[in-house]
Image (spheres, helix red, strand yellow):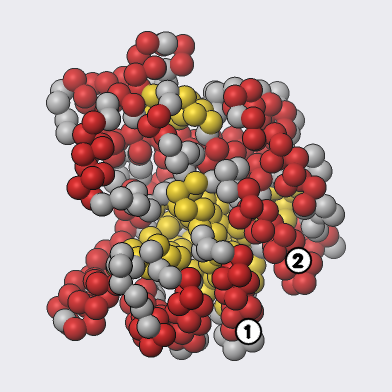
Amino acid sequence: MSIVEVRLVNEYDDIPARALRIKHVKGSLETPVYAVSVTDIDQKLIKREDLKGVVEVYIPLRLEKLEDMNRALELEQQFEYRVNSYMRKAPYDQLIVVVPLVEGVQGRELSVDDASSYGKYIAELVVNSRADIVCTPIFYRIAEKYIDILVERFLDTMTAYSIGVALSIPYTSRETREKLINIYLNTVNRNSRALLNFLCVDYNSSNPIYRYTLHNYVLGYVKELQEEIDEPVAIYGVNVKYNRVAKKYDELPARDLVSYFVQLDIFGGNHKRRPIPGEVAERLRAGESIWKQKLLNRNRYTYISLDRMTKELELAIPEAKLVEKLIAEGFNRSYVEKIVKHINIRNILSEVDILRPLFSGHGWQHFENPTQYLNSKEIVKIDNALLKNLKSYTEILKPKTKKLDKYLN
């Protein structure tokens, strides 16, 4: 079989929600899926048995660190050991997806030769025998004029390895996206392991509801590609976050969860750092109340601050008591933030267990379809952009793709 086979199980005419069956050499899974980062598998709040089919190995690569590793074998070996330890944490039956992030140095200009050299070296570093798919790099603080050069050399290098490769759509200008797509499509002719049915998209600490232009572009590209290859293309979102200004409000829409309803088949959490110096970020965090940490309320499809949950108990979730206890016992801020993050991941994983039968056409409890279920949530009352964008995305995706039973006939 090919590295990944994708089939459509079900979709809807009134909303761009769908269920895909993704088969790979180690097993299969059905979307929607939350891709847990391997670093979040702590065997306490998030255990291996909680995983739903996809594990994300996110590898940040700073240019200055790459230079150091290139000069010092010991540093390169330390990096290799760290990546191997990540891979060992991922259960064998999961689809393991590697996402490299290339981070530049502010104020430093690259050259064409630098970009090409980095592309080759990054490919050599991130390839691992336990990985199923390696996505082309995404970027932060890298001048766009060098991105296509780096990615092209990365793809050339990957032809030497027997591992699946998937295109990433980075958070860049449309012109750069077009260049990368053309480079990748040319690579497909030279590398049988370059996938057309699996696409990675960087939402840059946001989500498809807020990043309307980006997601609109992605859906348009995927629609054309699906018609060309006669197979669904699984869309995998990275750096997905419910809101970029989370600390300013006591309740915010769970736009990360709603991403499943706009054809984001798989997504993982946000890894990108705030675009400000570390010492400034620490001072800002110190000035923010720890009670502004937000927990996912699945009944409302909103993230609500711990402070508000303590004042309005009808909004509280059971795990809020645990966080309150940790704060009262004097645990440091970083630990509390980690626990909040893991609680939210657990709740997303639990919500996916409800969405999967809904999306596949089997319903859940008295809800017959995704639209009915979503309309029962508070989010549709407080998020003005949501329904508008849902309608727009639905129009983009007509006519629909082939269902699974058509492939089986």
Tag 1: amino acid: Asn
- The quadrant in which the C terminus is found is bottom right
Residue found 77% across the figure and 72% down from its top:
228
Residue found 64% across the figure and 35% down from its top:
385
Is residue 135 something one can see in this rendering? Answer: yes
Tag 2: amino acid: Glu
Say what secondary structure mark 2 lies in.
helix
Q: How many marks?
A: 2
Counting other residues with Cα less than 10 Å from the Cα at mark 2, is it few (<14), some (14-19), or many (20 or more)?
few
35 vs 122: above or below: above
Counting other residues with Cα less than 10 Å from the Cα at mark 1, is it few (<14), some (14-19), or many (20 or more)?
few
**Is 194 on the left-hand or right-hand side of 38?**
right
- The quadrant in which the N terminus is found is bottom right
152 vs 41: above or below: below
Judge by depth and name the residue closer to the eye, 408 or 251.
251
Point out which mark residue 121 bears: none
Is residue 158 something one can see in this rendering? Answer: no
Q: Position of residue 42 (x, y in %)?
A: 29, 46
Say what secondary structure mark 1 lies in.
helix
Q: How far is disc 2 from disc 1 in space, using C-alphas?
A: 17 Å
Q: In which quadrant of the rendered view does residue 186 lie? A: bottom right
Q: Which residue is mark 2?
A: 224
Q: Which residue is mark 1?
A: 186
Q: Position of residue 70 (x, y in %)?
A: 23, 82
Residue found 49% across the figure and 29% down from its top:
252
Residue found 39% across the figure and 24% down from its top:
305
**Is 263 on the left-hand or right-hand side of 106?**
right
